[in-house]
Image: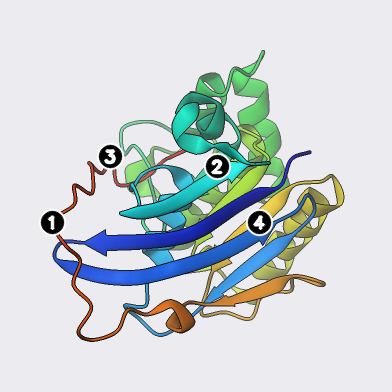
Amino acid sequence: MPVFAGSELTCLRGDRLVFTGLEFRIAPGGALVLLGPNGSGKSSLLRVMAGLLKPLRGTLGWDGVSVADDPDAHRAQVQYVGHLDAVKPVLTAAENLAFWAALAGAADPAANARAALDRLGVPHIAGVPGRYLSAGQKRRLNLARLLAAPATLWLLDEPTVALDRAAIALFEGLIAEHRAQGGMVVLSTHTDIATPGGEELHLDEFAPYADEEAGDEDVGDEYEEEGAGP
C-alpha cells in the first residue's frame, strides 16, 4: 500500500491563515492523532486531507502522486466522518448505510449495511428512520460507514462524541483491526483513544506568524459539509 503524505501545506479559511508549512506522512498501518487548541486547524486539515478543502499552498499525495492529478482515485481511498452526523432523516439506518455502500461499489449494499450495524452493536436500529435516532445512535451509524463502505484512509473528526465508554472500546478495536490490515487512520479527538504506535501532529507548531499575510491567491472552492469518501 502507498504512503499518504502532505508537504508545506498552508490553509486559509475566510481571510485567516489557519496553518502554514504543515508536514505529515502516514505509512500503511499508521495512525496520526491531531492535537491543538480549538481553532488550530484540526478540522480544516482533515477536510484538506479528504479533498473537501483546497490548500492555499503545498502538496498532498500518495507515494508522490498528487491528489490534484487524480482526485477521483483519492476519494476512492478515503472515508471521512466529520463531527456532524451525516444522516438522511427520511431513510432508515440500514438505508443510510446502503446508500454509502452503493456509492463505494459494493456488490450487495444491503448486506454491507446489516453487517456494519451488527459490528457496531446496533442491529436493532436497522429499520428506524434517521430522524428518530438518538445522538449516540447517529454517531454509531456514521462510524458504521467505515465498514459498510471500506476505504484505506479513515479521516475522523471527533469520532467518539456522544459515545459511552463501551462504544469507545468497540471503536478502538475497529481501528486496531483496520490498521492491522494496512489501513491508515487520522483523527482529531478530545477523548483518549488508544492508537498504539501511532504518531501525534501538534498543529500549533504550524500556526502562522501574527503578521503573516495570506496574499490574494485563489483558495478554491469547498464542497459538501459531510460525507467525503466512496
Q: Which residue is mark 4?
A: 185
Rate crowding at label 1 as few (under 14), some (14 to 19) or many (20 or more) other CA atoms within 10 Å. few
For marks 2 and 4 on the same chain, the one whose residue lies earlier in the sequence: 2
Which residue does the image show at 25% across and 70% down from the upper left?
Answer: 17
Q: Which label lies toward us, 2 or 1?
A: 1
| Tag in front: 1 or 3 | 1
Q: In the rendered structure, which disc, 3 or 2, sits on the residue that comes first in sequence? A: 2
- CA gap between label 2 and label 1 equals 32 Å
Identify the mark nearer the N-term, 1 or 3. 1
How far apart are the alpha carbons under marks 2 and 4? 10 Å
Q: State how far apart marks 4 and 3 are (Cα).
A: 22 Å
**Residue 216: image tag:** 1
First reached walking from the N terminus: tag 1 or tag 4: 4
In the image, what residue type sits under mark 1? Asp
Q: Which is in the foreground here, disc 1 or disc 4?
A: 1
Q: Residue furthest right?
A: 180
Q: Work out how far the residue at label 3 is from the one at label 2, CA to CA, in angstroms.
A: 15 Å
Q: Which residue is mark 2?
A: 79
Q: Secondary structure at mark 3?
A: loop
Residue count near mark 2 (Cα–Cα under 10 Å), binned few <14, some 14–19, many ≥20: many
Residue 107 against residue 139 in the figure, above or below: above
Q: Is residue 58 left or right of residue 105?
A: left
In this picture, residue 225 sits left or right of residue 98: left
Q: Tell me the kind of residue under disc 4.
A: Val
Helix, strand or loop at mark 2: strand
Which residue position is annotated with label 3? 223
User: Looking at the image, is mark 4 or mark 3 earlier in the sequence?
Assistant: 4
Can residue 110 be spotted in the picture? yes
Q: Nearer the viewer, mark 3 or mark 2?
A: 3
Give the Cα distance between marks 1 and 3.
Answer: 21 Å
